[in-house]
Amino acid sequence: MHGIHTIDTGFGRPTFDAAYLVVERGRGAFIDSGTTHSLPHFLDAIKAADLEAKDIDWVILTHVHLDHAGGAGQLMKHLPYAKLAVHPRGARHMIDPSALIAGAAGVYGEEEVRRSYGEIAAVPADRVVEAHDGFVVDLAGRALLCLDTPGHARHHIAIHDDRSNAFFTGDIFGLSYRELDSPGGAFIIPTTSPVQFEPDAAHHSIDRMLGYEPEAMYLTHYGRVTEVARLAGDLHETIDAMVAIAKRHATVADREQRIEAEFADLYVDRARRQGVTMPRDAIVKLLKIDIRLNAQGILVWLDRGSH
């Protein structure tokens, strides 16, 4: 649809982590790069679109978290003429990814980082373009507008595609797994991980995108969703509910465990209201990692004291 190809990056599990190839008049742009392990999927996507590596003009990163950007350096080695567009705050991490690697290793351990993300390569500085707010990527005359959209991360952009009137949202428009689709439509929750969640900024970014009256959102986790206004309302409500839960448990000793438990209850309740009939245990199992990471992310926000 509209020359937009969905790429399952293979990270985590099937239909968990998406990137996109946008094709216009024989030229291509990737949105996000997955991990280094994802490289074969991107090369296959080029062939499937009847393109060659020399036809790719851009790799655009929504942000530099490793499931979105960890494979950018290796991917760029295979794209001889492509430039990489990234938020100004993220550019230095693509040129020198050592801080990204160290941060991830501090959380998961070096061995797990290598297993999950592969060897993370730098991108030459002369191939990196800072996509400031309002920067337009011209893909063979097709406008891809980059908007500064903090809330999940301070180095986050969402990309509005004029041709399809849709956004590539990275993580700012939440997570919507296809396993939880129901006759009531898609189910969605916010993502607060890992360390830069800001609820007020997230609300603002969501509303800013809504101002364009998009017909669809292309999520990293996972795929194309419509009913944009309804999903935005669900995100706003869930962000507020998560903040209220976190504040209620802010000072107790076992606050992370309590927040995780209430997040699980919140998400299951919202899924039920959306018409999801999957058993509770199955919903919680599917969202287990997100529940844990969301609890950790909102605790970082609480401890910053910026609320």
Image (spheres, grey):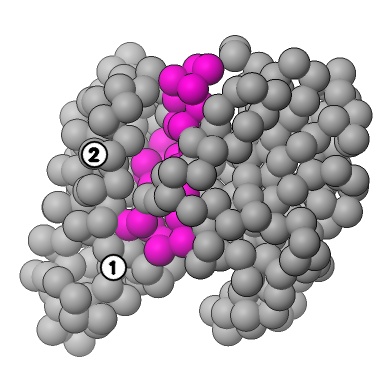
Q: Who's the residue at 46% across and 61% down the image?
A: 155
Q: Position of residue 179 (x, y in %)?
A: 47, 30
According to the picture, the residue beneath numbered tag 2 turns out to be: 207
Residue 83 on the magenta segment = no
Spatial CA span between label 1 and label 2: 21 Å
State yes or no: discs 1 and 2 in contact (Cβ < 8 Å).
Answer: no
Amino acid on which disc 1 is placed = Ile
Can residue 142 be seen here? The reply is yes
Decide: few, some or many residues near mark 2? Use Cα within 10 Å; few <14, some 14-19, many ≥20.
some
Can residue 171 be seen here? The reply is no
Amino acid on which disc 2 is placed = Asp
Residue 198, relative to residue 40: is it above or below? below
The secondary structure making up most of the magenta span is loop
In the rendered view, does 218 fall on the left or right side of 182?
right
| Front: mark 1 or 2 | 2
Quadrant of the image occupied by residue 302: bottom left
Decide: few, some or many residues near mark 1? Use Cα within 10 Å; few <14, some 14-19, many ≥20.
many
Secondary structure under badge 1?
A: helix
Start-end of magenta stretch? 150-179
Which of the image's four quarters has the C terminus?
bottom left
According to the picture, the residue beneath numbered tag 1 turns out to be: 298
